[in-house]
Image: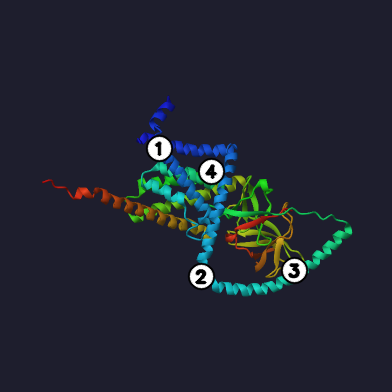
Amino acid sequence: MIASAWSQSLSLDATLMLNVFLVALTASASTILQVGFFSHLGFPWSTFSFPLVVVTYGVMRDRPLLSLGWSLVAGFLLDLHGFLGFGAETAALFSAFFFARFLFRRVLTDSGSGAIFLLGAATASCHRLILWSIDAVGALFRGAPLVFDLSSSMLLSPFRQGIVNGLSLLLLIRIGAAFRARFRKIFLSHETTPIAFS
Amino acid sequence: MTPVARSRLMILTVAAGGLSFFLHLFGAFNGGEAWLMRKLTGQEIRLSDAAVSLRQALEAPFKVNGIIQENDRLRSQNASDDVEIARLTTVQHENDELRALLGFTQKQKPVPVIARVAARTPEAGTHTILLDRGSDDGVAVDRPVVAAGGVLVGKIFKVERTSSVALLLSDTRSRIGAEVQNAAQTQGLVQGERGLSLEMQLIPQNEEVKTGDLIVTSGIEPLMPKGLVIGRVSEIQTQEKDPFKTAVVASPIAYDRISVVAIPFP
């Protein structure tokens, strides 16, 4: 009875399935690009994270399924390549999504450039801190040496990733807004020039 | 989509993530993961080659002066290496004669496995490389990984059927038993320093170690052969009341530019 109610409410139509397929495809391709291509380049390309930017973008555009879908697919692929054990990246991306959602709904009061940058940067920093926490748990229970130390490079890494991902999110939002504004003018131009019948 | 349906899909997505974790824990995904890594590794190698080419093309204009200085430094180092090679060749000849005299059987060593670097660690703070060879090719955990003519760069720590992950020596978690190629064959432990350098620790204060000494593996670990080059001492750090001193080791290999490695068999 519960299952039938759920299936009715979900109504898995073709559009939803197509969206699921597109999310899986784009998340997979971008993750492979990130670990296989960008990781070999220097800063800032090696610090850029496709999944983090899209997760935060999904929060801003009120598309939580986009964010969670990317977190699931990209997190799975990153876990296969990662060092912290299976599930660490997926958990960190899910947590980053909920953190970004909380920030966007409860803390940030406008959608200006500063707020967008802050959202992207804070989400990236939160993601990094969660991975460190998972590493700390692994060090406690598995006895592995802790990676975290008080070196300047380690302490600056959340800020570096925050800056890169904050700017990337800002760029993505502004490009998307410009794209939509341009097409809005084209499609609605007839409303501003009323046709007169003689 | 209604808010209720959206909320339920969100819950389902998070639940799918948790389910995948437990399925991995119980080994239900092993076959699928191995197949996926096999497919991904090929693509990542192509991307890796493209990235390395792009990086080299972008850095080339800035490297001219550096190349001239590096050339001069390598010429002088080459001269001292020639002396070392001559000494080792003499030792090798003596070793061969002794083996022949005692009737040792010379075993044909298996050919090392050559592997391409497909990807690097996604997490900051860790320094690992994904290789396109796995247990099907004879790769096993704790085997050494060497680059550029036999310089040790890491150790295998995770193996799948067609891929494996190596922990680079420069990673903080890396520990290798090593010795200095001096008269006393001073023993110590080479540890990575946050991906930036290597340090040889636990060197007794009374042991003589100087800048330029060659550091090699001591062979005390299983599957790690003795005599693999790690680097040369670039600096000695001592503190008065400390029973041990530390040597900073410079590797001739740039760890962030490795693209092909070999996995020798003991």
Amino acid at circle 2: Pro
Give the residue type that dot 3 points to.
Ile
Q: Which mark is residue A161?
A: none
Residue A3 lies in quadrant: top left
Please name the residue that numbered disc 3 is placed on.
B85
Please tell me which residue lies in front, A75 or A124: A75
**Circle 1: residue type:** Leu
Residue at x 58%, y 74% (from the top left corner): B68
x and y, in percent, of residue A125 in the image:
46, 53
Do pointers 1 and 3 mark residues of a single chain? no
Visible residue check, residue B210: yes
Which residue carries the number 2 mark?
A: B61
Closer to viewer: mark 4 or mark 1: 1
Residue A16 image label:
1
Q: CA separation, marks 1 and 3?
A: 68 Å
Question: Which residue was labeled with disc 4?
Answer: A87
**Whole-number angstrom distance, CA of label 3 to CA of label 2:** 35 Å
